[in-house]
Amino acid sequence: MQEKGTISIHTENIFPIIKKFLYSDNEIFLRELVSNAVDATQKVKRLATLGQYSGDLGDLTVEVSFDKDKKTITVTDKGIGMTAEEVKKYINQIAFSGATEFVEKFKDAKDANEIIGKFGLGFYSAFMVAHRVDIQTLSYQEGAEPAKWTCDGSTEFEIGPGDRKERGTEITLHINEDSEEFLDKWKIQQILDKYCKFLPVPIKFETKTESVEDGKDDEGKPKYKSVEVDNIINTTEPLWTKSPNELKDEDYLNFYKELYPMSEDPLFWIHLNVDYPFNLTGVLYFPKVKNEFELQRNKIKLFSRQVFITDEVKDIVPEFLMLLHGVIDSPDIPLNVSRSFLQSDSNVKKINNYITKKVADKLGELYKKDRKGFEEKWNDVGLFVKYGMISEEKFYEKGKDFALLKNTAGEFFTLDEYQEKVKANQTDKDGQTIFLYSTDAAKQDAFIQSANKKDYDVLVMDSPIDSHFINHLEQKLEKTSLKRVDADVADKLIKKDEGPENVLTEDQTKQVKEIFEKAIDNQNFSVEVEGLSPEELPVTITMEEFMRRMKDMAQTGGGG
Ligand code: ADP
Ligand code: MG
């Protein structure tokens, strides 16, 4: 006999689970509450614009405050507020109706953001740090009565008439014992700085002292006095939300300083601005770096409608561009973005492609507009371009037109230009064009000079990424190989018919070759017997180019 039934799940379990599971980044409770306050404020502004709210908007500043003695943190807004009915609908139902589903699914969630996103629990993240939460709210609607809601983290709540006189919502968290670290000015300031620095509505946290002019002294010099002013923690119209044509270079440089106070000025930047097929704005900076070991990843900040989400932008930004700095803002990336979301979302893939294309286009444009200037920046830019060309086929296709090669005389060439330049003189008997390069111009000076004497050109390839770039170019460029300028390589370029006669018979050549090979007894070296006139070296022993590069790469730890 079969029996049917429903698995019963106790909703009381939900809060312990939320608390425990979200524990690692519980500081995001403040981001969630402040962004709700900002949403409510934006809504009332919109209603006013649409003529659906005719009251006075007044000062819309959101305020965050705390009371160490009472152990509370409060977020207050003058947004749309809620009626008692709306509190029941938006605050109660969301969490409680989803409880069964939540308990079933929470185990699949990978991080706190994912839980919040999946279950619309932004507000409930307050219970990560609070044992009780109070809401006092007054709706914008005419004749609305203030409402008060209290919940102690169990499934029971109280709702009744409230005391709020002003339109908007005040949410008070009674901080639990484990979370008292949040009852600290610097801690709160730091969290607000991290997540709320660019929110579109002013956010006040405490006051600060400013010195202002206060009349003149007897000598006519200005006098100053200290005054307490509101400490507004955010910039409501950050640079990336403005139109590029109203911005000067100085604005971009100042914004860079704001983001990375200790850094040198960037080389240049790209203002991203797209509204179809997805929404994205942002500014990406090419940092000035001395070498790749200095490069830091994860310096790009990801925002969703000006709320900071994360600086782990993997998947949104192509791997090779993670070395860039700056901000990306897309409402198409939900606030509660999670890693598994990023990997599966098709918008993310599109955004990634868009950024790659945009960066390539910008570089191409800089190159076309001002080749000299581009050459001057090449030392710094080259690293990104080479890295990009190696790691992204799409980027290679664009990069090959502006990637530059530099020779020992300090001249720059594109790949095409260089091939054109050396083809006639540096093509061997098999039709392979040989690009000679030096990895250390000082040490290899003798070889470079002897190559130059024969009218061979030598490139400078002395940065750790170059060994990878050389390999890549060899795969990409047809009938071209790149060889380090060693004695033998330059010699080999002499076309066979121009070379001296071989005075040995074929048999004798073979014997000589075998004698040398036996003596060396190492597969990494190859022996060649050729061109035996008295002045020429009869035998050359070379370490295979490939083997040598492998060794180089091993020494630079793989580079890249
Ligand atoms: P989300 O913000 O993703 O909708 P939340 O759990 O953060 O989810 O909030 C649930 C709902 O509660 C909001 O959609 C909104 O309707 C309401 N709400 C929360 N905070 C406020 C507030 N400060 N003012 C007005 N309504 C709010
Ligand atoms: Mg929310």
Image (cartoon, grey):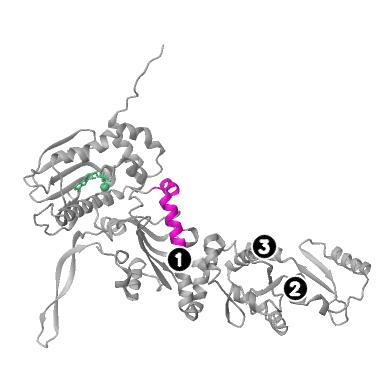
Disc 2: which residue: 428
Disc 3 to disc 1, how far (Cα)?
31 Å
Disc 1 to disc 2, how far (Cα)?
38 Å
In the picture, the disc for residue 550 is 3
Residue 15 versus residue 29 in the image, above or below: above
Circles 1, 2 touching at the beta carbon (< 8 Å): no
Sooner in the amino-acid sequence: mark 3 or mark 1: 1
- The residue segment tinted magenta is 338-360
In-front residue for pair 451/356: 356
Residue 455 versus residue 351 in the image, above or below: below
**Residue type beneath disc 3:** Met
Q: Quadrant of residue 208?
A: bottom left
In the rendered structure, the answer to whether residue 68 lies left or right of residue 476 reads left
Residue 278 versus residue 18 in the image, above or below: below
In the rendered structure, the answer to whether residue 296 lies left or right of residue 521 reads left
Disc 2 to disc 3, how far (Cα)?
24 Å
For discs 2 and 3, the disc positioned in front in the rendered view: 2
